[in-house]
Amino acid sequence: MRTKWHPGKLKSERLGHEDLSPDYQEQSSTLLSAIPASPGYYQDGDVIIGGLFSLRATLRDTKYMFGFQDTVYLPDFVFAALTKHYQHLLAMVFAVEQINKDVNMLFNLSLGFYIFNTDFIGMKATESPMSLLSGKSPPVPNYNCRAEKKDELVAVIGGVSTVISTQISQVLSLYNIPQISYGPFDLSLRDRAQLPSLYQFPRDSAALYQGIIRLLLHFGWVWVGFVVSDDTRGETFIRDMTQEMTKNRLCVAFTERIPEFPAEETIETDSFQIKITSTDISVVFGDTYSLLRFVYNIFCINITGNIFVTISDWDLTTIPFEPSQSYTYFGGGLSFSFHMDEIPGFKDFLRSVQPAKYPRDIFIQDVWSMIFECPHLSRDGTRKLSRCAQNDTLASRSLDIWDMNTSAQSHKVYAAVHAIAQALHEQLSLQVEEQSLDKDENLTPHPWQLHPFLQRGQLERSVGKGNVLNKTTSTTRLDIFNYQSLLNGTKAQVKVGEFTFQSHGVQHLSLNDELITWGDRKKAPSTDCYTICDPGSKKSAIQGKPICCFSCSHCPDGEFANETDMDECVKCPEDHYVNKERTQCLPKIPTFLSYEDTLGTVLVSVAISFSVLTALILGLFILYRHTPIVRANNTNLSYVLLVSLMLCFLCPLLFIGQPSPATCALRQVFFAVVFSVAVSAVLAKTFIVVVAFKATRPGKASQMRLVSRGSNAIVVLGSLIQGCICMVWLGTSPPFPDVDSQSEFGHLVLLCNEGSPAAFYCVLGYLGFLALLSLMIAFVARRLPDTFNEAKMITFSMLVFCSVWVCFLPTYLSTKGRAMVAVESFAILASSAGLLGCIFLPKCYVLLLRSDSNSRKKLHEQVSSIRQRN
């Protein structure tokens, strides 16, 4: 298409005759006396198919009245000559020639056509079908002005848009003539009550919607605008696409409804500019006709840099701009087109088209003149081309002027001719069965007789037979084209991928990103409703904003994000930890309270030191076993207590080091039994102290021997009960090695799981019971004489013992990991040291430093004093 469209031209339709340009007035004066040209392109045949194609858009009516009788016909003021639409007409001519060459079609009846130009303005589209019916332009309603042929018109192909299709159908439906629209599929045109004679080619809208969705997801375009025609098709598209985008977490930045030209302008320029520039990506749904005003607004506001995703119904190269302007505003756009196989022989046919070959084609003169930029002269009603190369072919023209690739509309025109021919063939077959083939009989069907065949899906069948659309109905293929400028400066629609759709679960997008150019951009644009969330952070919804608009927040502890714009952070496995940047998980390092650790070394040193000290005290008591202070406090119980305390000090050695099944099972049992022996020995010593002083009365000496035996029973019984508890623990739910992955950051703490917490606390509870019993008895005996009385020392030792373990419980429960082991080890050492220090250190002091108090004489004096008081 080669035309110049100035912004003021859209308004000139409201101006009077005096506003015509000088060039136009000059041309008008030259042609006033000319004989009107033929109203259409006619080719005779036994059966005629009408064709109504839009080859131009004009601004005025052609007829003006002067005075009362004179009628002057002025040429139309063409503001857009749609030369690329001439291919639609040629597709019909080619199809008719093919059918006439097929001896098996139409029972040797010839097929002809009568083609008229339907103005691209919907409000003027009614005149052409009336001219087609009457054979005269301007039309004479309800009259056939061609006396030589009557009732040959059986069907009409026409309607490049919804509005034009509707206007044509309103006329043809009055005569029950089938009409096949080659424009975009529109659900509103399926109303049989309003448009009973109109047929459309089906289209899989679900495939188109999913293809657009997959393309948006492929490039990460989540914030896009919608530009649609202001009609039912546009509303249906917004409704269905919004639902699909919501399912795929995509958002609509804006919706702009474009009124059809030349309807009254309703677009607010400022609002339109704000919307269209709010995002770099806009999905445009409509056709070349319905979006004329959108193109005009883009041109006037001078909006560049946007990428438009559209469908083939809106041909980016068929708009009223110069080629350079077209690419400036719409370069880099992506377009979806339903895949159609090439029509066999059609390209060769287009190369062979010449004005001399089709002298009766009244449209080729104007089209050829504009395509090859050579003027034509009009003399005596005959237009002749001048200064045009004799061998020019359409294949030599650039994309913006002529496209050798078959357009979707041309495919439909070709298929529509075959559909009508097939319907005619089937109708003729029925007639042949009912009557003989007598040449004198008129076999030409009436138009209304074709409706049953077209209603049974004849269009779908003709599409398959004609190799025009997909051969299989289960799979839909969409080709994706990119509007780009080639190296030689030629503008072209280059195929860059395709989309295959079978169902919502079976679909595939194949796209070659390296082939795509983005107009003046060097790389694919991105939507900017949000800030890109770097690795280590996730998207966070903003209250009151669409889901595509979000802020970024750091991943929580233990979670990571290794990609940009992640919706949710990923939780690390238990044996891994997240790095400081929270971009990846690292394996945790196994750890435990080892002998090499500072804390472990300290505990081991303290444990060994106290056990050696206990051994020294034991040796001291053995050395002074015959002294009164040792013998007076039951030597055997002292030995048992010291040995058990020495073992208690060694218990932490089982708690330190890497846990194993053996150490986990033994350490708590060993600790429980050894401590039970120690506390039972203290209880026995307390019992002996009380009974010993009561035995100093006359007649009580014999009881002392019984008490000595009873103390041994207390130690054995107290230890035996604890041993039984431990056996039950080991038999039901013994401790076992376990891993703590939460306590220490970056580490896997190897520790012992107690197995049965109830059994563990039963062990501690039993020790507490023995300690409290000893404390109570010692407290009763605290006022007895001091020299040989251990009651006060036992009382204090039990207070220390109980205090340590009472403090141990909450501390143990509140600590995790290696600290738990250290706390229990510390409690064992502290309580053992309390018993050792409170009970035995005072005696060691007497043995080593106060030997004068440790004699038989001193013993007799103390006994005499007690007897006197009693």
Image (cartoon, rainbow, N blue to C red):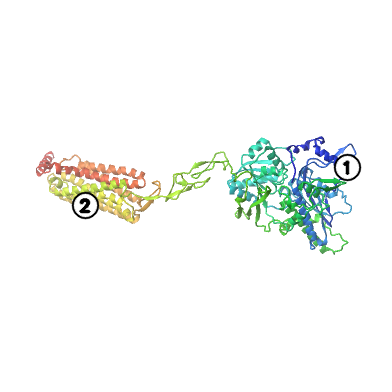
Viewer-nearest of discs 2 and 1: 1
Image location (x, y in percent) of residue 563? 51, 47
Displayed quadrant of residue 239? top right
Q: Nearer the viewer, residue 81 or 596?
A: 81
Horizontal and vertical percent for residue 505? 60, 54
Disc 1 residue crowd, few under 14, some 14–19, many 20+, Cα 10 Å: few
Apparent side of residue 675 relative to residue 92 in the rendered image (left or right): left
Q: Quadrant of residue 264?
A: top right
Cβ atoms under marks 2 and 1 closer than 8 Å:
no
Q: Residue drawn 44% across and 50% down? A: 573
Q: Nearer the viewer, residue 856 or 725?
A: 856
Viewer-proximal residue, 576 or 432? Answer: 576
- Which numbered disc covers residue 158? none
* Residue 472 location (% of width, % of height): 67, 58
Q: Is residue 717 left or right of residue 429?
A: left
Q: Is any part of residue 108 visible from this angle?
A: yes
The residue under label 2 is 713
Report which residue position mark 1 lands on: 33
Could you say where residue 745 lies in the image, as x and y percent from the top left? 40, 46
Q: In the picture provided, is 494 more to the left or to the right than 607? A: right
Task: Name the N-terminal-most of marks 2 and 1.
Answer: 1
- Figure quadrant of residue 845: top left
Assess disc 2: are there few (<14), some (14-19) or many (≥20) residues with their C-alpha within 10 Å of its C-alpha.
some
Q: Amino acid at mark 2?
A: Ala
Say which element carries label 1.
loop
Looking at the rendered structure, the kind of residue marked 1 is Ser
| Separation (CA) of disc 2 from disc 1 | 145 Å
